[in-house]
Structures are given as structure tokens and as C-alpha cells.
Image (cartoon, helix red, strand yellow):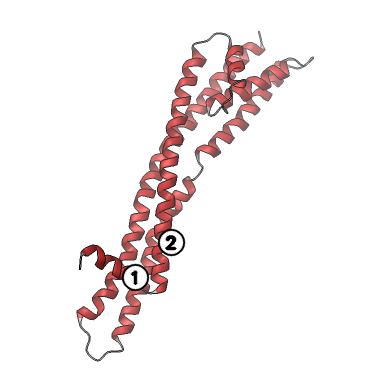
């Protein structure tokens, strides 16, 4: 019998609870890998959009055409584009009102940018909590399956008069598979969570810096 078949037999011969634990760990691994690929693509796209928008923003003197282009785009703006659109839209709307102080205009624009920034932060941090949960709990779930399987093996030994290693080895082996599956699910999730958290933090810092710089530009326009 091949090693692959022996491995499959150990899973099929495990107790129902251990099989359920293995199923949970496999599903957690599949879902976490799907989220890892999706999150990696999303963050890469967010960085590209941020680089392109910063290049466009600092290369123009009049921001009105840039705002018009973003507002009329058929694509939903994201990241800095969304923050810029929200701030500039509120700035223009408030400046059209009569008898309004420049500081009130700036406060309204900054408030709109803060709201847009918070929404972008929520999108950046989506699914990170799931990866953190998988990374922190999967080893313990696998360990629970292992402990249960080993406990069943020792209980079975108590029913025989002469115990041998060949009698307990299969039960312990199938129990240890649960621990291996827990590590298999946890390690990629932990690595991805740490990497994505770093990327998200850098993007959020870029958004905050842009908000401050854009607020300074709006301050000059408000008092001009």
C-alpha cells in the first residue's frame, strides 16, 4: 500500500470528532488561501492606484480638471482618489455658500476626508481579522483533535490484556494528522496576516500624509 493511501486510510479510520476537526481545518485553510490571493491582488491594486494618483495630483496646478475626471469616471474611485474627491467636493460646495468663514470650509472638507479615509481603511483591513483568527486558533483546534484521538487510543488499550505498539500506533498517527493540519492552516495565515498588516499600515500612512498635504493646499485656496 502506498504512503498516500495509508495517509487517506488514517483519516477515514479516525473517529467522527477527529474527522470533524480535520474537516474544519481543511475548510479554514481553503478559505484563508482564497482570502490571501484576493487580498494580495487588492493591496497591489491599491498601491498602483496610489502611485498613479500621486503622480497625477502633483503634476497639475489646477485641481478642478482632476476632480472632474475622477467624478465622471465610470470606475469607482478608491484610496487617495476617493479621499481627494470627497474633500474637494465638500470644499467647492461650502465655498459657494454665502457668509461662510474659510475655517468652516476647511473643517467641512477635512471632515469629509476623514470619513472617506475611514471607509478606505475598513476596506483595506477586510478579512485580516479572519486570517488572524485562523492563524491563532488552528493549532489549538488541531491539538484538540490530537488529544481526543490519543485518548481514544489509550482507552482501546485498556480493553486488551497485552498491549503492543502496533495496536496504538495507528490511532496516535491519525490523531497527529489533526495537529499537522492545524499547522498547515495556521502558518500561511500568520505569514499573510503579518505581511498584509504591514502593507495596510503603509497605505494608511500614505493616505494620512496626503490628507494633511491636501488640507494645506485647500487652506491656501480658502484664504486666497
Is 62 placed above or below 152 here?
above
**Residue 89 left/right relative to 3:** right
Tell me the distance, in whole angstroms, between the alpha carbons under discs 1 and 2. Answer: 15 Å
Mark number, residue 24: 2
Q: Which residue is mark 1?
A: 12
Location of residue 137 (image quadrant): bottom left
Location of residue 150 (image quadrant): bottom left
Question: What residue appears at the point 31 percent right and 65 percent down from the top-left corner?
Answer: 177
Question: What residue appears at the point 35 percent right and 79 percent down from the top-left corner?
Answer: 152
Residues packed near mark 1 inside 10 Å, few (<14), some (14 to 19) or many (20 plus): few
Mark number, residue 195: none
Q: What residue occupies the far bottom of the structure in this picture?
A: 161
Is 120 placed above or below 209 here?
below
Name the foreground residue: 180 vs 23.
23
Q: What residue occupies the far front of the structure in this picture?
A: 1
Question: What residue appears at the point 40 percent right and 48 percent down from the top-left corner?
Answer: 33
Question: What residue appears at the point 39 percent right and 49 percent down from the top-left corner?
Answer: 189
Kindly state the secondary structure of the residue where label 1 is placed: helix
Where is the C terminus found, in terms of image quarters? top right
Q: Is residue 135 visible?
A: no
Name the foreground residue: 194 vs 188.
188
Q: Earlier in the sequence, mark 1 or mark 2?
A: 1
**Residue 191 left/right relative to 217:** left
Kindly state the secondary structure of the residue where label 2 is placed: helix
Q: Position of residue 158 (x, y in %)?
A: 30, 87
Residues packed near mark 2 inside 10 Å, few (<14), some (14 to 19) or many (20 plus): some
Is 143 placed above or below 125 here?
below
Amino acid at each position: 500500500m502506498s504512503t498516500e493511501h495509508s495517509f487517506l486510510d488514517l483519516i477515514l479510520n479516525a473517529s467522527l470528532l477527529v474527522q470533524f476537526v480535520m474537516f474544519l481545518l481543511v475548510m479554514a485553510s481553503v478559505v484563508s488561501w482564497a482570502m490571501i490571493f484576493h487580498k494580495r491582488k487588492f493591496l497591489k491594486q491599491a498601491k498602483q492606484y496610489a502611485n498613479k494618483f500621486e503622480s497625477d495630483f502633483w503634476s497639475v496646478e489646477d485641481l478642478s480638471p482632476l476632480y472632474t475626471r475622477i467624478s465622471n469616471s465610470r470606475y469607482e474611485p478608491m484610496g487617495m482618489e476617493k479621499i481627494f474627491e470627497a474633500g474637494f467636493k465638500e470644499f467647492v460646495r461650502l465655498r459657494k455658500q454665502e457668509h461662510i468663514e474659510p475655517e468652516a470650509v476647511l473643517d467641512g472638507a477635512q471632515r469629509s476626508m476623514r470619513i472617506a479615509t475611514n471607509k478606505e481603511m475598513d476596506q483595506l483591513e477586510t478579512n485580516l481579522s479572519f486570517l488572524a483568527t485562523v492563524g491563532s486558533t488552528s493549532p489549538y483546534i488541531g491539538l484538540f483533535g490530537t488529544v481526543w484521538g490519543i485518548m481514544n487510543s489509550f482507552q482501546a488499550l485498556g480493553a486488551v490484556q497485552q498491549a503492543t505498539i502496533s495496536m496504538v500506533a495507528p490511532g496516535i498517527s491519525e490523531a497527529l494528522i489533526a495537529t499537522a493540519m492545524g499547522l498547515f492552516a495556521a502558518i500561511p495565515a500568520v505569514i499573510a496576516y503579518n505581511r498584509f498588516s504591514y502593507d495596510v499600515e503603509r497605505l494608511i500612512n500614505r493616505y494620512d500624509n496626503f490628507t494633511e498635504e491636501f488640507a494645506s493646499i485647500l487652506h491656501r485656496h480658502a484664504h486666497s
